[in-house]
Image (cartoon, rainbow, N blue to C red):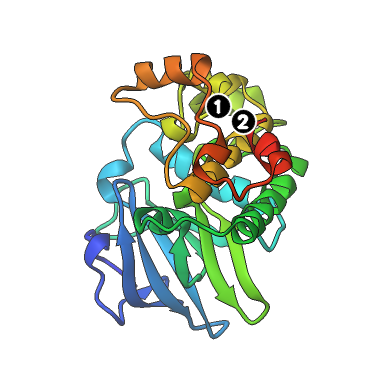
Amino acid sequence: MLHVLDVTKLPPGTMILDKYRVVKTLGVGGMGAVVAAEDLALDRRVALKILLPEMVRKPGVVQRFMLEAKAATRVKSPHVAKVIDVGHLTGPGYPEEGLPYMVMEYLEGRDLSDWVRMGKKLRVPEAIDLITQACEGLAAAHREGVVHRDIKPANLFVTDTAEGRVVKVLDFGISKILDEDPNEMSLTQTSAVLGSGLYMSPEQMRSARQVDQRTDVYSLGVCIYELLTGTQPHTAETFSELCVKVNVDPPTPLRDYRPDISDDLARTIAR
């Protein structure tokens, strides 16, 4: 059983819940750490996401963490990263409230933000294939009444499988469940603006709680624009300046960057 608080430096071989054996740390963010681990009961590799101890008492953080798990488990799609288990690590050395964790399917590959950083402009068929797969994942989420609200290249993970390249939608941490009990939605109700500004719809810029599935469609449009051109439709120094540009200034037409794109595709993305 794990009895250390520094979840950012778990050595290989560390046992968690007498079931998961740590293989390596995959990443550490502002809210949590993600490690690769072996599920000894089922003989498979998984990704274990653990909230940082210092985040447990911050308002809304545990709720957001658990919302991510709840939303992801509702969605059944090969294009949404699976959440296998969720709970709290408890016992000596842990916060009194317990340390939330989430077990997810293990993925190898890279997210689309890595491709953007490398300056890789995708061929049109390649970009369409990747975004179509993301659309399928989001369509499954929308059928379950889940709006993601933070679609961006960093949350679109590309992994290679025996069947070919597969896109997985990640991170439902600020998603909105449309049929949720209003009494359980304080995170959404008290957070007027959530998401990543450069990919955010005009409606979401005004109020995250008022949006529906169309905000995800808008964000996907921004993603494919960036994958094809290497730049976002709008950029700005501040969020307020960005809001003005998104609501007032039309983006540079896609075909100005990529004349190989058909008029029909350019119009579809612009919508």
Q: Amino acid at mark 1?
A: Ser
Residue sitting at x 29%, y 46%: 30
Q: Is residue 181 above or below residue 53?
A: above
**Looking at the image, can residue 171 be seen?**
no
Query: Is the residue under label 1 in contact with that under label 2 (CB below 8 Å)?
Result: yes
- At numbered mark 1, what does the secondary structure look like: helix, strand or loop? loop
Q: Amino acid at mark 2?
A: Thr
Q: Is residue 246 above or below residue 269?
A: above
Q: Nearer the viewer, residue 158 or 6?
A: 158
Q: Which residue is mark 2?
A: 215
- At numbered mark 2, what does the secondary structure look like: helix, strand or loop? helix
**Looking at the image, can residue 234 be seen?**
yes
Q: Is residue 161 above or below residue 27?
A: below
Residue sitting at x 77%, y 43%: 143
Write down the quadrant of residue 222 in the picture.
top right
83 on left or right of 60:
right
Q: Which residue is mark 1?
A: 201
Residue sitting at x 30%, y 42%: 55
